[in-house]
Image: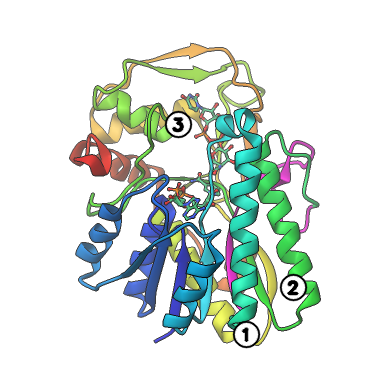
Amino acid sequence: MAKIFLAGGAGYIGTHTAVELINAGYEVIIADNFYNSSPEAVQRVEKITGKSVKLYETDIRDNKKLEEIFSENNIDAVIHFAGLKAVGESVQKPVMYYRNNIDTTLSLLETMEKFNVKNIIFSSSATVYGEENPVPYTETMKRGVCTNPYGWTKAMMEQIFEDAAAADKKLSVILLRYFNPIGAHESGLIGEDPQGIPNNLMPYVSQVAVGKRECLTIFGNDYPTHDGTCTRDYIHVVDLAKGHVKAIDYILSNDRCVEIFNLGTGVPYSVTEIVDTFEKVNNIKVNHVYGARRAGDLAECYANADKALRVLGWKTGKTLEDMCRDSWNWQKNNPDGYNK
Ligand code: NAD
Ligand code: WQD
């Protein structure tokens, strides 16, 4: 049974990926400093799968601790989720973002080299396409000019991985560019648990629906889109997690690969469509008003998802209705997230 090390695996995408990897027969080892997550989330993974998960509390930048983990476990591949991800906060605290996101990457690469681990998958983002590239984004496009430090950390880390793979012809790297993950596991046991006021649309919508926030502000309705609100490529987090399983299958069955894959549906939806669908499938009202545009938002962002289908045999299976229903199921069963 191949062993997969999930750095930052206690978070939103990491826990969903852990479930799908375990279901696919992989053994999962998680390390996290719980900066934006909790050990409870990993216990829920165990509850869903009925399997125990080895969990280490550590900062991924701690090379000594990483070496302990790598020497205790015969790791076949790494998935690097460990990062800070709040766009607005990254503008306020750029140094903290560069320090955390880049150093976690360097520590992982250094430790992998020491222990001769040659497979790594990285959580990148559609944000690296920047402002210049036209939608739909394809993997062959050049990285663009990012609009915030968070985005730049992703672009820089992609570059670091490409340079590391160019220097070490045995190192396999897969860069996964996520679009907009939403939804939750259908059990309602794991989901997104943002601290404080949510930055992202779906957690905000869910918190308004559950009564934690009064009203959603839709940022701008004068964009050049079909209804004036921004469009995004929302992807169910379980589909996204299954994309990681396909990427792990691929990286472990190829002698060597250096690849980039978009993980999106290829179908954009507007903010208004999200709110309307959420209200309809869950039969609940989401108070909302239209407000000013948010700085840095692009009118449209969606993937060309052909490559992941062609090469990995992966495509999404869940609908927007599934995404809205599962987000709400998680929120209403866990109104205060993992703090119960
Ligand atoms: P998350 O915050 O839920 O998960 C990240 C995890 O990494 C958290 O558990 C956090 O505690 C941990 N972490 C952060 N720094 C760490 C460190 N130095 N040492 C140990 N653990 C550390 O976020 P997520 O939504 O699950 O995102 C996972 C990855 O995917 C991130 O790198 C994020 O940037 C990337 N990504 C997310 C999205 C999205 O919309 N959620 C989109 C594109 C890319
Ligand atoms: C979606 C749409 C908002 C909140 C961000 C990162 C990206 C990736 C995913 C992370 C936009 C609108 C939102 C609200 C609103 N990264 N909105 N009212 O900005 O597409 O992408 O998350 O790791 O890098 O930039 O996602 O969920 O913030 O916004 O109207 O209260 O919802 O304007 O059109 P975004 P989002």
State yes or no: Cβ of the residue under disc 3 lies below 8 Å from any atom of ligand 2: yes
Q: Residue at position x 76%, y 79% from top?
A: 168
Say whether marks 1 and 2 touch (CB < 8 Å): no
From which residue to which does the magenta span run? 119-141
Number of other residues with Cα within 10 Å of mark 2, as a class: few under 14, some 14 to 19, many 20 or more: some
Q: Nearer the viewer, mark 3 or mark 2?
A: 2
Disc 3 residue type (three-letter): Leu
Say what secondary structure mark 3 lies in: helix
Say what secondary structure mark 1 lies in: loop
Q: Position of residue 259 (x, y in %)?
A: 69, 69
Number of other residues with Cα within 10 Å of mark 3, as a class: few under 14, some 14 to 19, many 20 or more: some
Q: Position of residue 218 (x, y in %)?
A: 48, 19
Task: Name the image quarter holding the N terminus.
Answer: bottom left
Residue 275 located left or right of residue 176: left
Residue that numbered label 3 is attached to: 201
Q: Is residue 133 magenta?
A: yes
Residue that numbered label 2 is attached to: 165
Disc 2 residue type (three-letter): Ala
Q: Residue at position x 64%, y 69% from top?
A: 109
Residue 295 located left or right of residue 160: left
Q: Is residue 286 above or below residue 265?
A: above
Residue 247 figure quarter:
bottom right
Q: Position of residue 292 (x, y in %)?
A: 57, 12
Residue that numbered label 1 is attached to: 254
- Structural distance between the alpha carbons of marks 3 and 2: 36 Å
